[in-house]
Image (cartoon, grey):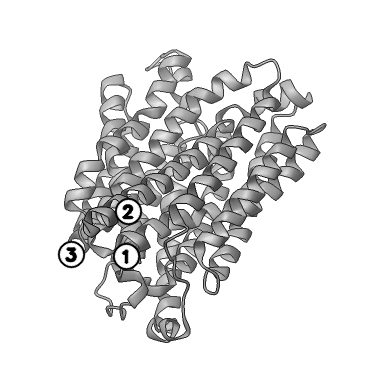
Amino acid sequence: MKSEKTHADKTLVFGVLFFCVFLAVFGEVLLSPFYPQFFKKVFGVEDLGYTGYYIFICRLTVVICAPLWGLLSRWIQVKYLLYLGQAGAAITTALMANSNSASQFLGYTILLLLFKSAYLMVYPLIIQLAGKERQSTVAGTYQAVFHGAIIAGTIAGAFMVNMAAPLSLFYWIAAADLCQLGLCWLALQNHATPHQSKSDANATKPENQLGFILAIGLVILTFQLANNLIRPYFTAYVTETGAFGVSLLASSCLFMIPNAMAIAALPYIRQFCQPERLAGIYRLGLGLLALTLFLQGWTEHLSILVFSRIIYGFCLAVTQATLELRLFSSSGSRLHFNYSLAMSFANMGHLGAPLLASWLVNTYTLAAPLAIAAAISTLNLLLSQVTIFRPLETPVPSRSSDRGIS
């Protein structure tokens, strides 16, 4: 009877935390494809360059703030940091609804991202509570929830921009943050989310951890750089290239194929992404990733483009989950801190991708980002094989990371 109650408690906690992931990603991507239209309609900003400036500041804020929450998690239970982040996000999002200018909106956004950076700890918290035996299941579910939220947010964003008063929707987003806060408090109030103790810190050998986090950070940076490089101009590439000649609606469907395939990859990740298989899976997956990126930029046949997008999307989800599992399995008690540092490297990739993509398109062609992304993926494959997937000393496991929910 007691085991059934424990299982029900775990199911509730995981359900709440994955719901938080969905809402956080949904809110983040709600406007991202439509910033130029949003700034023009709400604040009268005609300059398209302002969108690039806004996104740059947002990414830079996360790069700076994410490690601060990870550092705090070494002394304070993660659930309390999450409560603080959710409460601060709710207040700041409500303030955004009252913005009178683009600069004021940007200021509130920076403050919002300071608090929302705490949300990055939800994923490693789920991993921590699940235990090592369920890591692949959690990683697959996370990919499905993450990409499902992107699809839903992108569709909802199109409706938001067409509203008479788009800013009013931020009140609803603030309400969603308060909802998350209430649900997390109810689900986690009787569960410990252990912070790193002094004995745990001594067990994880900082010198090895530093080398590992720098290595996996560079792999994650190049991975995110390659896969975000193709996003800004993909719809323009397929609509303006005469060989394809698809409509704007069809280009949106082509754009979202990888997100849909990430959901389809869930059973594979759950079954096959086990620790002893990660190196081989990453090697095969990233090889196919590089090949399909090259094919997307090389082909003039729509059928090959669609097929390449399907394989690309499946491999994207699998390789990203593999990277995350490699990070989690080697972090020991430094799980939250290492993950926050890794996300800073990821956001550096996000930061550089649109800048590099703009230069490539202006200097060469709309297909250039796809070709360069394939080359960066090949470099990433070589880098990963000589760093994070070579035989490493197994870290001393911590008590807190293996005992699941207490």
> Which x, y percent locates residue 273?
22, 54
Q: Quadrant of residue 71?
A: bottom right
In the image, residue 224 lies at what x, y percent?
45, 50
- In-front residue for pair 5/303: 5
Mark 1 Cα-neighbour bin, 10 Å: few <14, some 14–19, many ≥20 = some
Mark 1–mark 2 Cα distance, whole angstroms, equals: 9 Å
- Look at the numbered discs 2 and 3 and tell me whether their residues touch, using CB distance below 8 Å: no
Residue 60 makes an appearance in the image: no
Height in image: 269 above or below 404? above
Residue 365, position as x, y percentages in the image: 49, 31
Q: Sequence-wise, which precedes: disc 1 or disc 2?
A: 2
- Taking the spot 60% from the left edge, 26% from the top edge, the residue there is 34
In the rendered structure, the answer to whether residue 102 lies left or right of residue 23 reads: right
Give the amino acid type for the residue marked by disc 1 in the picture.
Gly
- Label 3: few (<14), some or many (≥20) within 10 Å? few
Q: Position of residue 21 (x, y in %)?
A: 45, 44
Label 3: state its secondary structure: helix
Report which residue position mark 1 lands on: 404
Looking at the image, is 394 positioned above or below residue 286? below
Quadrant of the image containing the N terminus? bottom left
Residue 299 placement: quadrant: top left
SS assignment at label 1: loop
Of all residues shown, which one is farthest toward the right? 100
Of the two numbered discs 2 and 3 in the rendering, the one whose residue sits closer to the viewer: 2
Q: Which residue is mark 2?
A: 10
As measured in the structure, the alpha-carbon distance from the residue carrying label 2 to the one carrying label 3 is 26 Å
How many marks are shown on the rendered structure? 3
Q: Where is mark 3, residue-wise?
A: 276
Separation of disc 3 and disc 1 at Cα?
A: 22 Å
Which amino acid type corresponds to the residue marked 3 in the rendered image? Glu
Secondary element under disc 2, as helix, strand or loop, is: helix
